[in-house]
Image (cartoon, helix red, strand yellow):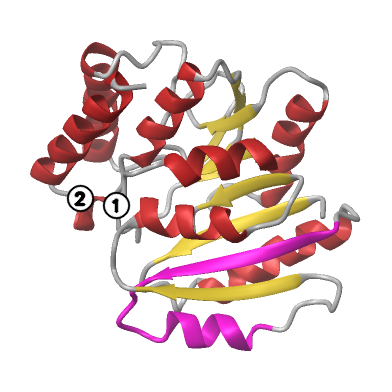
Amino acid sequence: MDLSIIIPVFEESKKITRDIEAASAFLISNRLKGEIIIVDDGSSDNTSQVAETVEVPTEIDLRVLHNDHRGKGFAVRTGIKVCHGKHVMFADSGNCVPFQNVLTGLNLIKNGACDIAHGSRKLQESKIYMPQAWYRRIYSTIFRWFIIAIMKIPSEFTDTQCGFKIYRGDLARKLYNDCITDGFMFDIEIILRAQKQKFRIKEFPVEWTADRDSRLLRNLSLKQMYNELTMIKRAISKL
């Protein structure tokens, strides 16, 4: 299998059909043998039921998994641990980054430039069609400098939280099997674990349209963020 596409969702019944159709169209148009794994993080709406009714070509394996509400990190981890692709990616719901952008990251990995390819909205070559709201841009800037100073994330990483990342499949399953973060800070843990194991990470520019219906700031508290980062720092220090 060429590519596993993981899409974590939480109360996304209005978007999930478009997400699946876009992922499916990408796989078919690029002649990639693939699977689409939707992981529902305990939605109280009918996200899972809607996802299960979406029709995809027979050559694509569509699976819908339903968790109790544990967090985005747990949802991504659930999907990656059961995937089969030679390459694996996860993408946020809402199709903010068109799936065609995957080809850039896949080529970086296939050509040996890196083991993990991160989409970035902050590179000069990135195309932003609708920017984040001003308060989210401020939050993003403060957060970036915080993780550089406190978590020792290299400053070369411009956009650790972009929900569009691609991995070698074997590597992804190993990293996420060891990951302990259930919430939004899982990206930080995966980066630090990858660096400890000398895996190479490279960013690539993406096309991006802000999703003003994003649930990030609705479900993330500063206390939760601090607790998760503290837990990650302790875990990484023992490696």
Q: Where is residue 216? Give x, y as percent.
A: 29, 52
Give the total of numbered labels.
2
Q: Can residue 159 be seen?
A: no
Q: Where is residue 138? Give x, y as percent.
A: 23, 30
Residue at x 42% of width, y 59% of height: 75
Q: Is residue 148 left or right of residue 201?
A: left
Magenta-span inclusion, residue 224: no
Helix or strand or loop: what does disc 1 sit on? helix
Quarter of the image where the C terminus is located:
top left
Instruction: Pick out the residue farthest to the left.
Output: 223
Q: Residues within 10 Å of mark 1 (few under 14, many from 20)?
A: few
228 w.r.t. 111: above or below: below
Q: Which residue, given by chain and number where applicable, does mark 2 sit on?
A: 220
Q: Where is residue 157? Give x, y as percent.
A: 45, 18
Q: Where is residue 72? Give x, y as percent.
A: 36, 55
Residue at x 56% of width, y 50% of height: 90
Q: Are marks 2 and 1 in contact (CB under 8 Å)?
A: yes
Q: Can residue 144 be seen?
A: yes
Residue at x 29% of width, y 69% of height: 69
Looking at the picture, which amino acid does disc 1 mark?
Leu
Quarter of the image where the N terminus is located:
bottom right
Span highlighted in magenta in the image: 33-54
Q: Is residue 16 left or right of residue 188?
A: right
Where is residue 208, by image quadrant? top right
Instruction: Pick out the residue farthest to the right.
Output: 31
Q: Which residue, given by chain and number where applicable, does mark 1 sit on?
A: 216
Where is residue 103, by image quadrant? top right
92 w.r.t. 234: above or below: below
Looking at the picture, which amino acid does disc 2 mark?
Leu
Labelled disc at residue 67: none
